[in-house]
Image (spheres, helix red, strand yellow):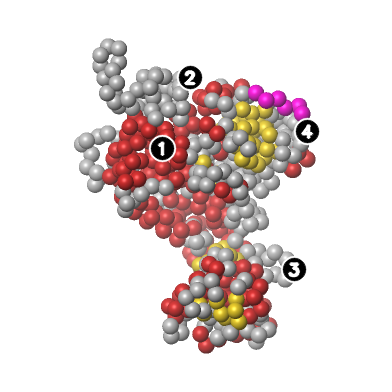
Amino acid sequence: MSSTWASLPSASASTPLGLWLTQNGGVASDLISFGRAGAASAKGKGKAADIPAAADIDKGYGLFACRDAKDLVEDQIVAAMPRSLLLNAACVIDFANNSEAATGGGEGGEGDELSEGRPVQPSPQSCLAACLNGLMADEDCGIDERRALLVFLLWARFCVPPGQAADGLGPNHPLFWKPYVDALPQSLETPVFFDPESDAMQLLMGTGVDDSTNAKLKKLHREYRQMLPHLRSLVEDEEVDYAEELTDLSFERFKWADGIFWSRIMSFHSTGSTEEEGAPDYHLVPFVDFANHALDPKLRWHLGDDGSVQLRVTKLGAESGFLAGEELSISYGEKPNSEFMFIHGMTLPDNPHDCVSFRAPLIEYAIDEGSEASIEAKTLLMRFLGLRPMVDVRSPLDKSGTPLRSDDMLVLLISVAMEHDGLVPEIAGDDEHFFVVNGEVVMDKDELWRVYNEASCPDLYQRAYYILSDLLRSRLHELAYAAELEEHPPKSQKEYFLFVLREGHRSILEGAMEFLTTKMQTRK
């Protein structure tokens, strides 16, 4: 291999973050470095000509090729961050309870004496520990992995006393994580930060993201108020009334910490990790989490046997190589544009995984006597079969033209079944793992499909098509409300991403309506 292992390349090492990574075991080949991402390339494969160069968006860092490389092999490791630089809930709790004095490398704590006879001031981590311990002791509030990391992000960015990170700081020094936290985006452009009266919020109408955003804001407001008495511990200000919003830790800053968490977190459990039971799942991984998303990534992240997080070359990367200056991306997963917008504030043109999602239409159409019991049985059956109570409508996947995958169609059929059909699932006895539909025991999806076949249940399918078409028409009607805002070219990168979201949804909905219209006419 032509690449060599070293500390981070000079372009990266010249930054505070690069120096910090180098000094603490972060390594990379001479093929890869990080820097500020460009306006058009930061998130996905947008058309650069359509995105205003002066878009006012904090794009953060990206990873880039340092030079041309043609002799790569699949799974070649190009960077690795050691376990000691992985930030998780256990790390946060340990960091809070094992502090070094803010003045230097020695262990210090409340009550220790300096040589001149003055007591050492309480470590800044004591405020962090007080907040975490308070949450743990609060039965009504509590703490989980996400909340531990949220509290840490708020403390590290807004509550740590000013100071300059220096060489040789131990991992329990209050300034140890400062270079990483300072490199995180200082602002976010996800929908929870949109002005409620802005064009951007209007452009979300009809995408479903508007409803998700409103629900998210309500949930965050409740959580913020619940955590506020404990967040007060972070600021050490006796003048602050715990019932009032904290200036240093306002709701806007709480939203920032939540946004950083969801947009950058890496789930180790999703990799099938065999780490010990109870090991943390969610991790923030410096350097690796600066990689942006692409449909055709040349890198992927991998959890090493030694607990490190590695960046490895994909098959595409090995076949096509790297070009100097090229942005090197990973995949965030096969997600629809609504999810990319909600979590990352971006979308992808021609996203093959795009879809329009609807909640399973259970309540609106369960009008028979005893409907509450039938809704419960339907919900339990979906859970038993591993089905999400959602119906995702997509562009046709094959020549049949169907906009629904098998699981989505099954959810729809379960949802609209009615008592007089004899097709509503029944729970046999007290066992929630034993269902009967139309006299047939159902233990898996294949058995339910044999009951719900179109030839023997024509009325069920006709009802499903009509109900779905109503949902599609309603969503298209909502999209039309803000259509006039799309009559001009996008004024910002944010508007461009929203236009892509809306156009993708409109195309999917119109294609699905055409399919359903043909289906329903054929059945008449």
Q: Amino acid at mark 1?
A: Ile
User: Circle 2 sits on which residue?
Assistant: 168
Q: Quadrant of residue 49?
A: top right
Nearer the camera: disc 3 or disc 2: 2
Q: CA distance from mark 2 to mark 4?
A: 38 Å
User: Circle 4 sits on which residue?
Assistant: 70
Seen in the picture, residue 406 relative to 111 is either above or below; the reply is below
Q: Amino acid at mark 3?
A: Lys
Q: Is residue 442 visible?
A: yes
Q: Residue at x 42, y 22 (%)?
A: 164
Q: Quadrant of residue 233?
A: top left
Mark 1 or mark 2: whose residue is earlier in sequence: 1
Near-viewer residue (186 or 505):
186
User: Circle 3 sits on which residue?
Assistant: 399
Image position, residue 178 (x, y; %): 44, 29
Characterize the magenta stretch by its predominant secondary structure. Answer: loop
Nearer the camera: disc 4 or disc 3: 4
The boundaries of the magenta stretch are 1-6
Q: Secondary structure at mark 4?
A: loop
**Which quadrant would the C terminus be assigned to in this image?**
bottom right
Nearer the camera: disc 2 or disc 4: 2
- Assess whether mark 1 and mark 4 are in contact (beta carbons under 8 angstroms): no
Q: Residue at x 30, y 35 (%)?
A: 235
Q: Residue at x 53, y 52 (%)?
A: 341
Seen in the picture, residue 264 relative to 517 is either above or below; the reply is above
Mark 2 or mark 4: whose residue is earlier in sequence: 4
- Please check the rendered image and state whether residue 399 is part of the magenta-colored stretch, yes or no: no
Q: CA distance from mark 3 to mark 2?
A: 63 Å
Mark 4 or mark 1: whose residue is earlier in sequence: 4
Image position, residue 29 (x, y; %): 67, 28
Q: CA distance from mark 1 to mark 2?
A: 22 Å
